[in-house]
Amino acid sequence: MSTAPKLPSYADIETLPEGVTGEIIDGELVVSPRPRAPHIHSASGLSVRVGGPFGHGIGGPGGWLIEVEPELLLEVDANYRPVVPDLAGWRLSTMPALPADGEFRTPPDWVCEILSPSTASSDRIKKMPFYARCGIGHAWLVDPILRTLEVYRLENGRWSLLSTHCDDEEVCAEPFDAVPLPLSALWRVPAGAKPPA
């Protein structure tokens, strides 16, 4: 008599060594190394340029909680628990305060994935449909190598690509279109490399 394979659980995440990130995506434990410098720089730039005006009201309207790499423990699909977006944001009307236990069980209003060669396929093919099933209203995909920003809005349960931006454009992108975002803040040219023409 054969037994069904054991599905990964949060206990498997807790046993991972330091320096890696674990997620359960489509019923599989996905372990990723800490991101490389371009990824980190883009995430840091977004944390400042979005988190400042919208999360803290610095030069902008406030009204959001913006978090870096929150573990989403959503009840939508047990095969996706936890999922860790690079950034996520909740309107204060959705989640008025950070959860006291540190467990993010409320779907965010916005997620952002910073694409890397090792995660881009999973981010697009597995995580984006999951975010749609959760009813997350907005998603951004940022590629620090190609220097692009893709802006999506959820419409009738499907993602609609609203716009694509690149290089050093200054953009007003949903849901943070109240404050211009200079994309140049997201890109870092590695030492010794020439900027793209």
Image (spheres, rainbow, N blue to C red):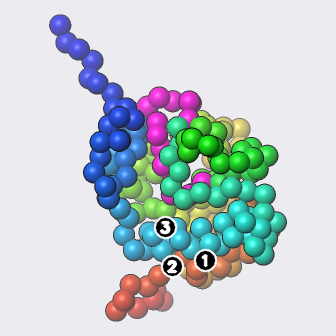
Q: What residue type is labelled 2?
A: Trp
Extreme residue in the top direction: 1
| Residue 172 counted in the magenta span | no
**Relative vertical location of residue 122 with respect to residue 49 in this rendering, above or below:** above
Query: Residue 50's image quarter?
Result: bottom right
User: Mark 2 or mark 3: which is in front?
Assistant: 2
Q: Which of the two discs, 2 and 3, labels the residue nearer the N terminus? A: 3
The residue under label 3 is 143
Q: What residue type is labelled 1?
A: Leu
Q: What element carries label 2?
A: loop
Magenta stretch bounds: 74-88
Q: Distance between the residues labelled 2 and 3?
A: 9 Å
Q: What element carries label 3?
A: strand
Q: How far apart are marks 3 and 1 (CA)?
A: 11 Å
Q: Residues within 10 Å of mark 1 (few under 14, many from 20)?
A: many
The residue under label 2 is 187
Q: How far apart are marks 1 and 2 (CA)?
A: 7 Å
CB of mark 1 within 8 Å of CB of mark 2? yes
* 86 sits to left or right of 62: left
Using the rendered image of the protein, determine whether residue 106 is visible from the camera's viewpoint.
yes
**Relative vertical location of residue 155 with respect to residue 32 in this rendering, above or below:** above
Q: Where is residue 188 in the image (x, y as percent from the top left)?
A: 47, 82
Residue at position x 35%, y 41% from top?
13
Extreme residue in the left direction: 1
The residue under label 1 is 183
Q: Position of residue 111 (x, y in %)?
A: 60, 53
